[in-house]
Image (tube, rainbow, N blue to C red):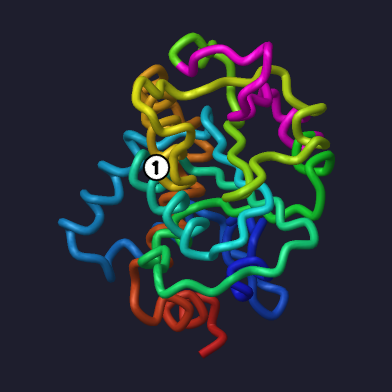
Amino acid sequence: MERLLESGGVRFEGYSCQGHHLSPAQVIEVLSSHLEERRRERIDEVLAGRTYHIAPVVEGLVNTGNVSAVMRTSEGLGLQPFHIIKGTVKFKHSVRTTQGTHKWLDVSVWDTARECTSALREKGYQIVVTHLDSKAIPISEVDFTKPTALVFGNEAKGVSEAMIKEADQTCLLPMPGFAQSYNISVAAAMALFEARRAHPGGDLSKEDRQRLRADFYMRSTRHAEDYLKRHLGLK
Protein backbone atom coordinates (compact mmCIF):
# COMPACT_ATOMS: atom_id res chain seq x y z
CA MET A 1 0.00 0.00 0.00
CA GLU A 2 2.86 2.37 0.77
CA ARG A 3 4.22 1.90 -2.76
CA LEU A 4 0.76 2.55 -4.16
CA LEU A 5 0.41 5.79 -2.19
CA GLU A 6 3.83 6.96 -3.31
CA SER A 7 3.06 6.30 -6.98
CA GLY A 8 -0.46 7.72 -7.02
CA GLY A 9 -1.61 10.60 -9.19
CA VAL A 10 0.52 9.89 -12.26
CA ARG A 11 -1.46 10.56 -15.43
CA PHE A 12 0.02 8.83 -18.46
CA GLU A 13 0.87 11.35 -21.19
CA GLY A 14 3.35 9.35 -23.21
CA TYR A 15 6.82 7.91 -22.69
CA SER A 16 9.87 10.04 -21.90
CA CYS A 17 13.50 8.99 -21.55
CA GLN A 18 16.78 10.93 -21.65
CA GLY A 19 15.17 14.02 -23.15
CA HIS A 20 13.22 12.07 -25.77
CA HIS A 21 9.44 11.75 -25.80
CA LEU A 22 6.92 9.49 -27.50
CA SER A 23 3.28 10.56 -27.64
CA PRO A 24 0.52 8.08 -26.74
CA ALA A 25 -0.11 7.53 -30.46
CA GLN A 26 3.57 6.70 -31.00
CA VAL A 27 3.62 4.34 -28.00
CA ILE A 28 0.64 2.49 -29.48
CA GLU A 29 2.32 2.26 -32.88
CA VAL A 30 5.55 0.85 -31.42
CA LEU A 31 3.98 -1.67 -29.05
CA SER A 32 1.03 -2.85 -31.13
CA SER A 33 3.03 -5.55 -32.92
CA HIS A 34 4.27 -6.93 -29.59
CA LEU A 35 0.78 -7.68 -28.28
CA GLU A 36 -1.39 -10.59 -29.31
CA GLU A 37 -4.50 -9.65 -31.23
CA ARG A 38 -6.80 -11.02 -28.51
CA ARG A 39 -5.08 -8.81 -25.92
CA ARG A 40 -5.53 -5.74 -28.11
CA GLU A 41 -9.18 -6.68 -28.56
CA ARG A 42 -9.63 -7.08 -24.80
CA ILE A 43 -8.13 -3.64 -24.20
CA ASP A 44 -10.55 -2.19 -26.75
CA GLU A 45 -13.45 -3.89 -24.97
CA VAL A 46 -12.39 -2.40 -21.63
CA LEU A 47 -11.97 1.07 -23.12
CA ALA A 48 -15.44 0.86 -24.66
CA GLY A 49 -16.95 0.70 -21.17
CA ARG A 50 -14.55 3.00 -19.34
CA THR A 51 -15.65 6.28 -17.75
CA TYR A 52 -14.37 9.23 -15.74
CA HIS A 53 -17.94 10.27 -14.95
CA ILE A 54 -17.96 8.48 -11.56
CA ALA A 55 -14.99 9.05 -9.24
CA PRO A 56 -14.75 6.82 -6.14
CA VAL A 57 -13.16 8.45 -3.08
CA VAL A 58 -12.09 6.67 0.12
CA GLU A 59 -11.30 8.75 3.18
CA GLY A 60 -9.39 7.65 6.23
CA LEU A 61 -9.65 3.88 5.70
CA VAL A 62 -7.35 1.99 8.06
CA ASN A 63 -7.38 -1.53 6.65
CA THR A 64 -5.45 -1.78 3.39
CA GLY A 65 -7.62 -4.75 2.46
CA ASN A 66 -10.66 -2.48 2.39
CA VAL A 67 -8.90 0.05 0.16
CA SER A 68 -7.91 -2.79 -2.14
CA ALA A 69 -11.45 -4.21 -2.21
CA VAL A 70 -13.00 -0.87 -3.17
CA MET A 71 -10.30 -0.39 -5.80
CA ARG A 72 -10.99 -3.79 -7.35
CA THR A 73 -14.73 -3.07 -7.44
CA SER A 74 -14.11 0.30 -9.07
CA GLU A 75 -11.88 -1.13 -11.77
CA GLY A 76 -14.25 -4.02 -12.38
CA LEU A 77 -17.09 -1.56 -12.97
CA GLY A 78 -15.02 0.42 -15.45
CA LEU A 79 -14.46 3.50 -13.28
CA GLN A 80 -11.11 5.03 -14.21
CA PRO A 81 -10.37 7.60 -11.47
CA PHE A 82 -9.74 6.61 -7.85
CA HIS A 83 -9.01 8.99 -4.98
CA ILE A 84 -7.49 8.18 -1.59
CA ILE A 85 -7.54 10.69 1.26
CA LYS A 86 -5.00 9.34 3.70
CA GLY A 87 -4.89 12.16 6.27
CA THR A 88 -2.89 11.11 9.31
CA VAL A 89 -4.06 7.51 9.26
CA LYS A 90 -1.59 4.67 9.79
CA PHE A 91 -2.60 1.76 7.62
CA LYS A 92 -3.19 -1.68 9.03
CA HIS A 93 -1.79 -4.30 6.69
CA SER A 94 -4.10 -6.92 5.20
CA VAL A 95 -3.35 -9.99 3.12
CA ARG A 96 -6.05 -8.89 0.68
CA THR A 97 -4.65 -7.07 -2.33
CA THR A 98 -5.87 -5.23 -5.39
CA GLN A 99 -4.85 -8.28 -7.48
CA GLY A 100 -3.00 -5.79 -9.66
CA THR A 101 -6.12 -3.80 -10.56
CA HIS A 102 -4.62 -0.55 -9.23
CA LYS A 103 -2.28 -0.39 -12.21
CA TRP A 104 -5.25 0.09 -14.56
CA LEU A 105 -6.60 3.09 -12.62
CA ASP A 106 -5.71 6.77 -12.35
CA VAL A 107 -4.97 6.88 -8.60
CA SER A 108 -4.71 10.23 -6.84
CA VAL A 109 -3.64 10.57 -3.19
CA TRP A 110 -4.53 13.51 -0.96
CA ASP A 111 -3.70 14.63 2.55
CA THR A 112 -7.00 16.37 3.32
CA ALA A 113 -10.66 16.31 2.32
CA ARG A 114 -10.47 19.93 1.15
CA GLU A 115 -7.56 19.27 -1.20
CA CYS A 116 -9.39 16.35 -2.77
CA THR A 117 -12.78 18.00 -3.17
CA SER A 118 -11.25 21.21 -4.54
CA ALA A 119 -9.47 19.26 -7.26
CA LEU A 120 -12.63 17.31 -8.06
CA ARG A 121 -14.78 20.44 -8.25
CA GLU A 122 -12.29 22.01 -10.66
CA LYS A 123 -13.05 19.08 -12.96
CA GLY A 124 -16.80 19.57 -12.61
CA TYR A 125 -17.67 16.83 -10.12
CA GLN A 126 -20.43 17.08 -7.54
CA ILE A 127 -19.42 15.67 -4.15
CA VAL A 128 -21.83 12.99 -2.89
CA VAL A 129 -20.97 11.56 0.52
CA THR A 130 -22.32 8.31 1.95
CA HIS A 131 -23.46 9.57 5.34
CA LEU A 132 -26.70 9.40 7.29
CA ASP A 133 -28.00 12.83 8.25
CA SER A 134 -31.24 14.79 7.95
CA LYS A 135 -30.48 15.78 4.35
CA ALA A 136 -29.48 12.33 3.10
CA ILE A 137 -31.40 10.92 0.16
CA PRO A 138 -31.56 7.31 -1.10
CA ILE A 139 -28.69 6.65 -3.48
CA SER A 140 -31.26 5.75 -6.14
CA GLU A 141 -32.33 9.44 -6.11
CA VAL A 142 -28.85 10.88 -6.66
CA ASP A 143 -28.57 12.76 -9.96
CA PHE A 144 -25.87 10.76 -11.72
CA THR A 145 -26.32 12.70 -14.94
CA LYS A 146 -23.76 15.05 -13.34
CA PRO A 147 -20.14 13.93 -12.97
CA THR A 148 -20.12 12.53 -9.44
CA ALA A 149 -17.49 11.82 -6.81
CA LEU A 150 -18.81 9.17 -4.39
CA VAL A 151 -17.14 9.35 -0.98
CA PHE A 152 -16.78 6.48 1.50
CA GLY A 153 -15.44 6.94 5.01
CA ASN A 154 -13.51 5.20 7.75
CA GLU A 155 -14.53 1.67 8.74
CA ALA A 156 -15.61 2.70 12.26
CA LYS A 157 -16.25 6.46 12.23
CA GLY A 158 -17.39 7.06 8.67
CA VAL A 159 -16.50 10.25 6.84
CA SER A 160 -14.88 13.20 8.63
CA GLU A 161 -16.67 16.38 9.67
CA ALA A 162 -14.51 18.19 7.14
CA MET A 163 -15.82 15.97 4.37
CA ILE A 164 -19.44 16.41 5.48
CA LYS A 165 -18.98 20.17 5.16
CA GLU A 166 -17.64 19.67 1.63
CA ALA A 167 -20.60 17.53 0.53
CA ASP A 168 -23.01 18.80 -2.11
CA GLN A 169 -25.27 15.92 -1.16
CA THR A 170 -25.33 13.09 1.37
CA CYS A 171 -26.89 9.75 0.52
CA LEU A 172 -27.76 6.45 2.12
CA LEU A 173 -28.02 2.84 1.01
CA PRO A 174 -31.15 0.69 1.31
CA MET A 175 -31.11 -1.30 4.54
CA PRO A 176 -34.45 -3.02 5.22
CA GLY A 177 -32.98 -5.49 7.71
CA PHE A 178 -31.95 -5.22 11.37
CA ALA A 179 -28.32 -4.38 10.58
CA GLN A 180 -27.46 -0.71 10.98
CA SER A 181 -24.48 -0.59 8.66
CA TYR A 182 -22.63 -2.46 5.93
CA ASN A 183 -18.97 -3.38 5.75
CA ILE A 184 -17.20 -0.60 3.84
CA SER A 185 -16.30 -2.84 0.91
CA VAL A 186 -19.92 -3.99 0.61
CA ALA A 187 -21.28 -0.46 0.93
CA ALA A 188 -18.92 0.79 -1.76
CA ALA A 189 -19.82 -2.08 -4.08
CA MET A 190 -23.54 -1.37 -3.70
CA ALA A 191 -23.16 2.37 -4.19
CA LEU A 192 -20.78 2.16 -7.13
CA PHE A 193 -22.94 -0.44 -8.86
CA GLU A 194 -25.95 1.87 -8.52
CA ALA A 195 -23.92 4.76 -9.94
CA ARG A 196 -22.69 2.60 -12.84
CA ARG A 197 -26.22 1.37 -13.53
CA ALA A 198 -27.43 4.97 -13.70
CA HIS A 199 -24.52 5.99 -15.92
CA PRO A 200 -23.39 3.09 -18.16
CA GLY A 201 -20.12 4.72 -19.18
CA GLY A 202 -18.34 4.27 -22.48
CA ASP A 203 -17.99 8.04 -22.78
CA LEU A 204 -14.24 8.55 -22.97
CA SER A 205 -13.03 11.43 -25.08
CA LYS A 206 -10.89 10.56 -28.09
CA GLU A 207 -7.85 11.91 -26.25
CA ASP A 208 -8.49 9.90 -23.08
CA ARG A 209 -9.17 6.75 -25.06
CA GLN A 210 -5.87 7.04 -26.89
CA ARG A 211 -3.96 7.97 -23.74
CA LEU A 212 -5.36 5.00 -21.81
CA ARG A 213 -4.82 2.62 -24.72
CA ALA A 214 -1.14 3.58 -24.78
CA ASP A 215 -0.91 3.16 -21.00
CA PHE A 216 -2.62 -0.24 -21.13
CA TYR A 217 -0.38 -1.35 -24.01
CA MET A 218 2.68 -0.49 -21.93
CA ARG A 219 1.36 -2.36 -18.90
CA SER A 220 0.41 -5.38 -21.02
CA THR A 221 3.70 -5.70 -22.90
CA ARG A 222 6.69 -7.46 -21.39
CA HIS A 223 9.85 -5.37 -21.78
CA ALA A 224 7.78 -2.47 -23.13
CA GLU A 225 10.42 0.09 -22.17
CA ASP A 226 13.11 -1.85 -24.01
CA TYR A 227 11.06 -1.68 -27.23
CA LEU A 228 10.41 2.03 -26.77
CA LYS A 229 14.07 2.81 -26.02
CA ARG A 230 15.13 0.81 -29.08
CA HIS A 231 12.70 2.83 -31.20
CA LEU A 232 14.29 6.02 -29.85
CA GLY A 233 17.76 4.70 -30.62
CA LEU A 234 18.71 4.50 -26.95
CA LYS A 235 19.46 0.76 -26.91
Q: Any magenta on residue 232?
A: no
Residue 82 horizontal/vertical position (percent): 56, 47
Q: Does residue 189 appear left or right of residue 12 in this picture?
A: left
Kind of residue at disc 1? Val
In the image, 92 versus 54, the foreground residue is 92
Q: Residue at x 71, y 57 (%)?
A: 86
Is 195 located above or below residue 42 in the figure? Answer: above
In the image, 40 versus 19, the foreground residue is 40
Q: Which residues are magenta?
A: 118-139
Q: Residue furthest left?
A: 38
Q: Does residue 59 appear left or right of residue 217 in this picture?
A: right
- Residue receiving disc 1: 186
Residue 200 horizontal/vertical position (percent): 36, 23
Q: Residue at x 49, y 52 (%)?
A: 105
Residue 37 horizontal/vertical position (percent): 17, 58
Q: Residue at x 55, y 39 (%)?
A: 56
Q: Can I make out residue 30 in this image?
A: no
Q: Can I make out residue 175 in this image?
A: yes
Residue 58 horizontal/vertical position (percent): 61, 46
Is 132 located above or below residue 146 in the figure? Answer: below
In the image, 44 versus 158, the foreground residue is 158
Local SS, label 1: helix
Using a 10 Å C-alpha cutoff, classify the residue at mark 1 as few (fewer than 14 neighbours), some (14 to 19) or many (20 or more).
some
Is 97 located above or below residue 29 in the figure? Answer: below
Q: Residue at x 26, y 42 (%)?
A: 45
Q: Split into 4 quadrants, where in the image is the N terminus?
A: bottom right
In the image, 57 versus 107, the foreground residue is 57
Q: Residue furthest bottom?
A: 235
Q: Any magenta on residue 124?
A: yes
Q: Does residue 62 appear left or right of residue 100 in this picture?
A: right
